[in-house]
Image: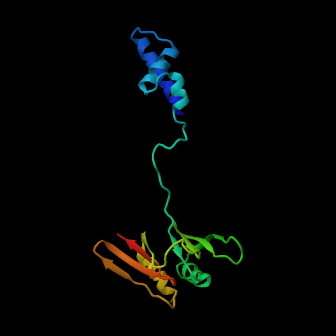
Amino acid sequence: MSSIEKAKQMAKSLRASLEARNHEVSHSTALELVARQLGYKDWNTAAALLPPDNAPTAITFDRPVPILRMFDETKAREFYLGFLGFGVEFEHRFEADLPLYLGISRNGLHLHLSEHHGDASPGSTVFVPMRNIELLRDELLGKRYGYGRPDIVRQGWGLVLEVHDPFGNRIRFCQS
């Protein structure tokens, strides 16, 4: 129901309540009273300024997507797709010989990898809360990746499995 429809329902309810107490008012008078209660000068102003249903009522955020810098497409694919098991969501280049911008995901975790100078700095860290960290560790160790055999480290607040990509970025998978 739109804000205008809600205001009209309020006017109808007000009119019925007043009539039950032997105070008859016209529908237009009830609309004017509701408009004043809502802080508007009159019904015409309220009808023009009441927010539509699709107007945001609060600031909301969708999931963040970290951007990590990469310098070599082959190494990036070997690490992120082969070793970590991500799938490609999209690939973008402005032209065939220009830098790659790659969107990848796995089970709700979305990352963007970029060869574009200035998109991100090498050496970034992404903190990834998760469940079943032991299963991930076992999967990664089973792949016998030549550049890393990550293990779980117990911290005071939970478990951490950290992996390092070929470009100096770290992903910290964490389970409370």
Q: Which of 68 and 54 is in front in this view?
A: 68
Coordinates of residue 97 in the picture (x, y in percent): 70, 78
Classify the position of the C terminus by image quarter: bottom left
Q: How many marks?
A: 0
Residue farthest to the right, as pictured: 96
Coordinates of residue 157 in the picture (x, y in percent): 30, 71
Q: Nearer the viewer, residue 152 or 8?
A: 8
Q: Give above or below for 101 relative to 165.
A: above
Residue farthest to the front, as pictured: 118
Residue farthest to the bottom, as pictured: 146
Classify the position of the N terminus by image quarter: top right
Q: Which residue is drawn at 49% across and 78% down?
A: 122
Residue farthest to the left, as pictured: 156
Q: Which of 176 and 110 is in front in this view?
A: 110
Coordinates of residue 48 in the picture (x, y in percent): 55, 29
Q: Which of 96 and 52 is in front in this view?
A: 96
Q: Is residue 77 left or right of residue 129?
A: right
Coordinates of residue 59 in the picture (x, y in percent): 46, 49
Q: Residue at x 56, y 74 (%)?
A: 113
Q: Residue at x 54, y 33 (%)?
A: 2
Query: How is the structure coloured here?
Result: rainbow
Q: Give above or below for 60 relative to 14.
A: below
Q: In this view, does 151 lie to the left or right of 93?
A: left
Q: Residue at x 51, y 84 (%)?
A: 166
